[in-house]
C-alpha cells in the first residue's frame, strides 16, 4: 500500500510544481502586458486572468491537496519518520513551499484587481525560489540521513546564487535588445 501512496505523492508533486512554475511565468507575462497600449493591455490581462484562474483551481490547488494528503498518509503508515532529522527538515521546506503557494495565490488575486506590485524581474527571481524548494526537498527525500548538511547548505546557497545571477544576466541581455 505504501508504494501506491508514494507513487501518487510523486505524481502530484510533479503536477504541483508544474502549476507553480507556470503560474509565476503567467504572472511575468501578465505584468509585462501592462506596458502594452490599449486595447492590447485589456485583452491580454483578461486572457492571463482566465489562464491563471484555470491553472490555479484546476491543476495547482488540487495537486497540492493530493501531495499533502499522500504525505500525511505516508507519515501515518511510517510514523517513525517524524523522528528523523531529514524528515523534519524536509517538512520545514514543505511548509515553506506551502507559504510560497499561498503567496502566489495572493499575487493572482492582486493582479485580478489590477495591482501589480512586483516587476517582471522580481517575479523571475520569485520563480527561482520554487526551484530552490524543489532541489532541497528532493535531495532530502532521496538522500535522507546520508546527506551531508554542510554540503547541502553550501549547495543550496550556490544554486541560489547561480539562479539569481542567471536572472540578472537574462535581464541585462533582454534590456540590451
Image (tube, rainbow, N blue to C red):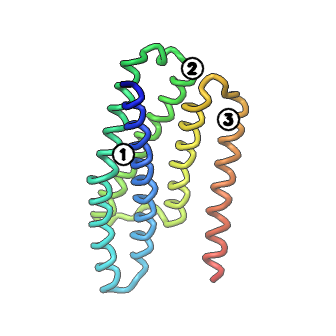
Q: Which label's residue is closer to the chain start, 2 or 1?
A: 2
Residue at position x 55%, y 57% from top?
Answer: 125
- Left or right of residue 118, residue 131 in this image: right
- Using the image as rendered, state which of residue 86 and residue 41 is in the foreground: 86
Instruction: Determine which of the numbered discs, if any, sits on residue 153 in the image.
Output: 3
Residue assigned mark 2: 85
Alpha carbon distance from label 1 to label 3: 25 Å
x and y percentages locating residue 147 in the rendered image: 66, 28
Give the residue pinned by disc 1.
Answer: 102
Left or right: 90 as drawn, with respect to 68:
right
Q: Tell me how far mark 2 sits from mark 1, CA to CA.
A: 26 Å
Helix, strand or loop for disc 1 = helix
Mark 2, Cα crowd under 10 Å, few <14 / some 14-19 / many 20+, is few
Q: Is residue 99 above or below residue 149?
A: below
Above/below status of 47 relative to 91: below
Give the residue displayed 30% in from the left and 86% down from the top: 39
Query: What residue lies at 47% left-to-right and 13% top-to-bottom?
Result: 80
Amino acid at each position: 500500500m505504501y508504494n501506491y501512496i508514494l507513487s501518487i505523492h510523486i505524481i502530484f508533486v510533479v503536477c504541483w510544481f508544474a502549476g507553480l512554475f507556470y503560474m509565476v511565468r503567467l504572472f511575468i507575462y501578465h505584468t509585462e502586458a501592462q506596458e502594452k497600449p490599449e486595447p492590447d493591455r485589456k485583452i491580454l490581462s483578461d486572457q492571463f486572468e482566465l489562464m491563471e484562474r484555470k491553472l490555479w483551481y484546476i491543476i495547482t490547488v488540487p495537486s497540492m491537496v493530493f501531495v499533502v494528503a499522500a504525505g500525511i498518509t505516508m507519515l501515518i503508515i511510517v510514523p517513525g519518520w517524524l523522528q528523523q532529522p531529514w524528515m523534519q527538515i524536509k517538512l520545514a521546506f514543505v511548509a515553506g513551499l506551502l507559504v510560497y503557494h499561498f503567496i502566489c495565490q495572493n499575487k493572482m488575486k492582486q493582479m485580478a484587481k489590477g495591482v501589480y506590485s512586483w516587476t517582471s524581474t522580481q517575479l523571475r527571481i520569485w520563480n527561482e525560489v520554487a526551484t530552490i524548494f524543489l532541489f532541497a526537498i528532493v535531495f532530502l527525500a532521496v538522500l535522507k540521513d546520508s546527506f551531508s548538511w554542510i554540503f547541502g547548505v553550501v549547495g543550496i546557497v550556490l544554486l541560489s546564487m547561480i539562479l539569481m545571477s542567471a536572472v540578472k544576466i537574462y535581464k541585462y541581455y533582454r534590456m540590451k535588445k
